[in-house]
Amino acid sequence: ETLRYTPKVKYKGQISAYAWTFAGGQPSQSDAAQPGPVQFSGPGQYLVAVSVTGACGAGSDSIFLDVQQREPIQILYAPVLLCSGSSPDTLKAAPGGGTWSGKGIADAQLGVFDPGSVVPGEYKVTYSRTQGACASSGEATIRVVESEQVRLLADTFCVNSPPRPLQADKPGGAFFGRGITDSLSGLSTFSSR
């Protein structure tokens, strides 16, 4: 990264000559009253000095210009796809210490995205961090789709009934819970024994 700096001087009276120096800058010096932009190629502290001559004598002043480097943001984890019925998910980015923003963000500090708080669609979330005078940000897009609605087909079991398959209106799922004896075969069975 580079910084372009345009120096200016405030004064009273008539000035007949200027002598600017920009340590580490390009250009490194100028004799113009208002020199054009000076470019500094990296972070650090740079001395900027000006000497002036006028009818009443000479004067000078200097400052240190503090050039800081922006830190790149890296999105470490953001799900590409979430179902609207999914639990909130925590996004991750580096470096730490930033905040998240955008629709669906339930906790800006922790980076919690709640797919249940938005309608299905695509959402751009932004992670922002300020270090010194420099601000950095990164973005991710999360797509929220409508959760599948599953309905169990009604069935009645007696205490002594033999195990038999359970059914739902959508194939491909698995049953879990008390009494389920086989959920991996594709036909989940229930036993009341």
Image (spheres, rainbow, N blue to C red):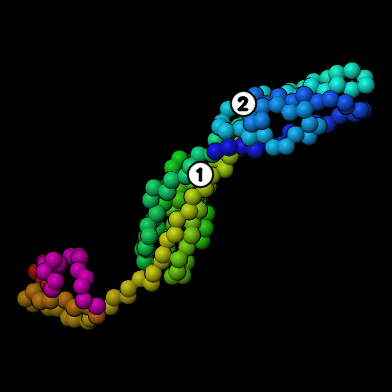
Q: Residue 134 is drawn in which quadrant?
A: top right
164 relative position to 139: left or right? left
> Whole-Å distance between the Cαs marked 1 and 2?
32 Å
State which tag comes first along the sequence, 1 or 2. Answer: 2
Residue 145 percent location from the top left of the image: 39, 69
Residue 62 percent location from the top left of the image: 73, 23
Q: Residue at x 89, y 22 (%)?
A: 54
Q: Residue 166 is drawn in which quadrant?
A: bottom left
Quick one: 30 or 97, which is closer to the camera? 30
Q: Amino acid at mark 1?
A: Gly
Q: Disc 1 designates what residue?
A: 98
Q: Residue at x 55, y 35 (%)?
A: 69
Q: Amino acid at mark 2?
A: Gly
Q: Secondary structure at mark 1?
A: loop
Q: Residue 179 is drawn in which quadrant?
A: bottom left
Q: How many other residues sit within 10 Å of disc 1, few (<14), some (14-19) or many (≥20)?
A: many
Quick one: 185 or 72, which is closer to the camera? 72
Provide the major secondary structure of the magenta segment: loop
The answer, for residue 139, to whether it is visible in the render is yes
Residue 26 percent location from the top left of the image: 64, 31
Q: Disc 2 designates what residue?
A: 24
Q: Using the image, determine if residue 113 lies above or below residue 58.
A: below
Q: For the view shown, which residue lies furthest in the top direction?
A: 57
Whether the magenta-drawn stretch holds residue 171 is answered as yes
Q: What range is drawn magenta here? A: 170-187
Q: Which mark is residue 137?
A: none
